[in-house]
Image: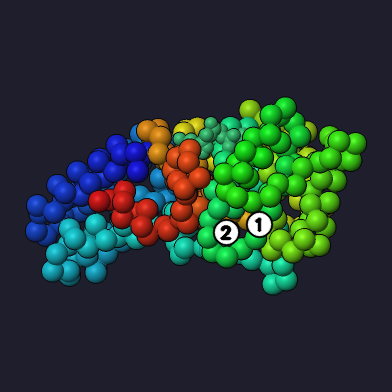
Amino acid sequence: MATFGSLSERLTDTLKNLRTKGKLSASDVDGTVREIRRALLDADVAFDVVKQFTNTVRERALGDDVNRALNPAQQVVQIVNEELVNILGGEQRRLQFAKRPPTIIMLAGLQGAGKTTLAGKLAKWLVKDGHTPVLVAADLQRPNAVNQLQVVGGQAGVPVFAPEPGNGVGNPVKVAKDAVKYAETKLHDVVIVDTAGRLGVDRDMMKQAADIRKAIDPDEVLFVIDAMIGQDAVATAKAFQEGVDFTGVVLSKLDGDARGGAALSVASVTGRPIIFASTGESLDDFEPFYPDRMASRILD
Ligand code: GDP
């Protein structure tokens, strides 16, 4: 994945150097941990996350298990891998479905994060799995948003619920509520609600998202974050957590060549799992997120 290219290179080089050694001294471990710390910080991983990560790696690497191991360096590589999996959320977390359909999924995030594209990706992925989703245009802020969702819906082959002229126009909460009723009568088993974003965190936008959340009580609130936004990722994620209390994260634009580390911090900083990864503009560039696979890719 392009996004983690340089981080991946640096961590792999550092660990490769370690592999040439037999027994490890405390200063070998310290040197390695220092290089890992630098690589993570340079990749924009949040400071607190780096600190906790490197402290844990150091403590474990100096522990008895590593000293007694046949191949101590290999053991350290294993520890780095495990701790990377931990900051990425540990176990894979699957999308949660309602016990009684429809399952309601609300998307939130800044404008341009990739929400509308994600709505299409998610719908297409769900259709493949035998579901009958409907997309809901509750982003009434951006003039072209409803139209864009209709295009995406067309590509995914799923219907789009949009406000009729004179009925709920300009009222995204009403549109979202009506859409859930519509899904119940038309037997759509998943409702995907696209909401409005702004370029930056904005009180009105957050209130609107919070009002929609309250009105439709979603099974999942997915916070979509652009892996390219760098250091701002953590503050943005915290603002959305406070504003809409999202249940999961979607990392988008992982195909880009940004440093990506900030996106890596989001699960750890918010305590919310990353559920999906978006890796391109096409609706097929999308996959469930597996912390262990991502860690292996980074350390490959
Ligand atoms: P929204 O404002 O959050 O609804 O964002 P959009 O879905 O409109 O996406 C903004 C732009 O990013 C569009 O040009 C999308 O084609 C593009 N985009 C979305 N997801 C990805 C992705 O995973 N990779 C890349 N390269 N571009 C993406």
The quadrant where ligand 1 appears is: top right
| Label 1 residue SS | strand
Q: Do the residues labelled 1 and 2 touch (CB within 8 Å)?
A: yes
Colour logic: rainbow
Mark 2: which secondary structure?
helix
Rendered image: mark on residue 127: 2
Q: Nearer the viewer, residue 190 or 266?
A: 190
**Crowdedness near tag 1: few (<14), some (14–19) or many (≥20) residues, C-alpha within 10 Å:** many
Q: Pinpoint residue 76: horizontal percent, then vertical percent.
A: 24, 58
Q: Would residue 47 be visible to someone looking at this image?
A: no
Query: Which one is in front, 171 or 131?
Result: 131
Amino acid under disc 1: Pro
Mark 1 or mark 2: which comes first in sequence?
A: 2
Q: Is 163 displayed left or right of 230 in the figure?
A: right
| Residue 200 x/y as whole percent | 64, 29
Q: Which mark is residue 133?
A: 1
